[in-house]
Image (spheres, coloured by chain):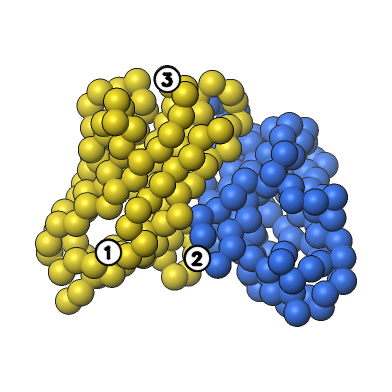
Amino acid sequence: GAGVSQSPRYKVAKRGQDVALRCDPISGHVSLFWYQQALGQGPEFLTYFQNEAQLDKSGLPSDRFFAERPEGSVSTLKIQRTQQEDSAVYLCASSLTAGMEKTQYFGPGTRLLVL
Amino acid sequence: AQTVTQSQPEMSVQEAETVTLSCTYDTSESDYYLFWYKQPPSRQMILVIRQEAYKQQNATENRFSVNFQKAAKSFSLKISDSQLGDAAMYFCAYRSAQTSGSRLTFGEGTQLTVNP
C-alpha cells in the first residue's frame, strides 16, 4: 500500500503560535514513532506509540510538545507556544508490529520554521 | 545509553567507483540491529540495508554491502559501482533488540557526493 504520509510538508509559524503536525502511517502498522531532525543533524527520537498507547515519550523536549494517536492509526504531534528552537524537520515512522526486528519506514517529514 | 558516530561529514566518489562510509557505535548490549538509511534532498528517509548483531555474515543488498565488526563496534557501508542517484545523506542507526518498540539512535550523517 501507500507509504507513510505527513502533512503539512512545510509550516511557518510565528513564535508563540500552536502547530499541529499529522502523520498517516502505513495501513496496519502497529508501531509509530516521531523524530525531530535539526538542520544538518541526524534524527532524534521524540515519542513512540503501540496502537493508541503512548509507551515512550521520554524524548519530548518540553511539556509544550504533545502527541496523540487516539484510534491507533493517524497520529498528531502538537507543539504549543512555538519557539525558534523548535524549527526542525519532524519525521514520522511506522513499523508493522511491535516486534523488535521490524524495520521503521519513514514519511517525508514536516519542515517547521518558527519566526 | 547507546551512541552512534559517523566521523566523515562528507565523502565524494567518482561514478562507477567504490566508496566506504564509516560508522562506529557504543553499547553494552549484546543483541541489537544496525541500519544504514539514505536521505536524498527530498528528505524521505529510505532504508538501505540492515544487519542483525547475532548474524556473523555481513548483509548485502545489490551494490550495497556492510562490514560488520562486532568486537570493534564498527559498521561500515560499501557502495560499489556508484551511481549519480546514490548522492544523498547517509545515516547509520542503532536499535536495541532487548525491548519492543525500540527507538532508532542515529549518527550525525555523511553527505555523499557522486561525481560524473
Distance CA(mark 2)–CA(mark 1): 15 Å
Q: Quadrant of residue B59?
A: top left
* Chain identity for the colour yellow used in the image: B
Give the mark, 1 or 3, whose residue is nearer the N terminus: 1
Q: In this view, does B112 lie to the left or right of A43?
A: left
- Is disc 1 placed on a helix, strand or loop? strand
Q: Which quadrant, please, contains the C terminus of chain A?
A: bottom right
What residue is pinned by disc 1? B11
Q: Which chain carries label 1?
A: B
Q: Position of residue B11 (x, y in %)?
A: 27, 64
Q: Where is residue B35 in the image (x, y as percent from the top left)?
A: 40, 41
Asked whether the viewer can see residue A42, the reply is: yes
Q: What residue type is labelled 3?
A: Ser
**Circle on res. A40:** 2
Q: What residue type is labelled 1?
A: Met
What residue is pinned by disc 3? B30
Q: Do the residues labelled 1 and 3 touch (CB within 8 Å)?
A: no
Same chain for the residues at labels 1 and 3, yes or no? yes
Task: Tell me which residue sits at (69%, 74%) in the image.
Answer: A113
Q: Is residue B116 left or right of residue A26?
A: left
Q: What residue type is labelled 2?
A: Gly
Q: Position of residue A61 (x, y in %)?
A: 74, 51
Distance CA(mark 1)–CA(mark 3): 31 Å
- Is disc 3 placed on a helix, strand or loop? loop
Asked whether the viewer can see residue A3, the reply is: no
Q: Mark 3 lies on which chain?
A: B
- Is disc 2 placed on a helix, strand or loop? loop
| For residue A34, above or below residue B116 | above
Task: Tell me which residue sits at (32%, 58%) in the image.
Answer: B8
Q: How crowded is mark 2: few (under 14 residues within 10 Å), some or many (20 or more)?
A: few
